[in-house]
């Protein structure tokens, strides 16, 4: 969604959800297997990096499973 005030992106999936949102926001936390981490993925920096780059980050687990992530950047430069 793009309007005069902000750019908003909403992404959702139908996976298992995020069991501990607080933990998932900590740098370095990852649920990736050792094999995945050994090839350079699953470093646990995705959500913390997004949080630093946007004005709003909302994460919610859907009751039927999956996660909805809402990211917003204010175009006026105000948080």
Image (spheres, grey):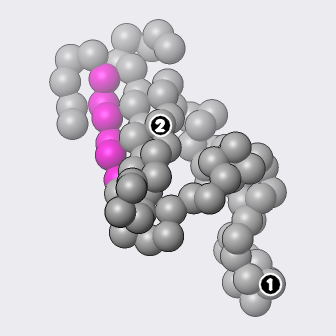
Q: What main secondary structure does the magenta stretch of the protein show? A: strand
**Where residue 74 sits in the image (x, y, percent)?**
39, 20
| Residue 37 drawn above or below residue 56 | below
> Callout 2: helix, strand or loop?
strand
Q: Earlier in the sequence, mark 2 or mark 1?
A: 1
**Where residue 33 sits in the image (x, y, percent)?**
74, 83
| Residue 12 drawn above or below residue 16 | above
Q: Residues within 10 Å of mark 2 (few under 14, many from 20)?
A: few
Q: Label 1 belongs to which residue?
A: 34
The span from disc 2 to disc 1 (Cα, nearest Å) is 28 Å
Q: Label 2 belongs to which residue?
A: 58
Asked if residue 7 is among those painted magenta in the image, a careful observer would answer yes
Asked if residue 62 is among those painted magenta in the image, a careful observer would answer no
Residue at the location (70% across, 76% down)? 32
Q: Which residues are magenta?
A: 6-11
Classify residue 26 as left or right of residue 67.
right
**Where residue 13 sits in the image (x, y, percent)?**
37, 64
Q: Nearer the viewer, residue 36 or 14?
A: 14
């Amino acid at each position: 969604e793009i309007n005069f005030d902000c750019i908003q992106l909403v992404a959702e999936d139908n996976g298992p959800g995020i069991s501990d949102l607080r933990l998932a926001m900590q740098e370095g936390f990852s649920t990736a297997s050792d094999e995945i981490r050994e090839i350079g993925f699953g470093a646990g920096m995705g959500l913390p990096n997004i949080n630093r780059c946007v004005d709003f980050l909302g994460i919610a687990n859907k009751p039927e499973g999956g996660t909805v992530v809402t990211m917003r950047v204010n175009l006026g430069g105000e948080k």
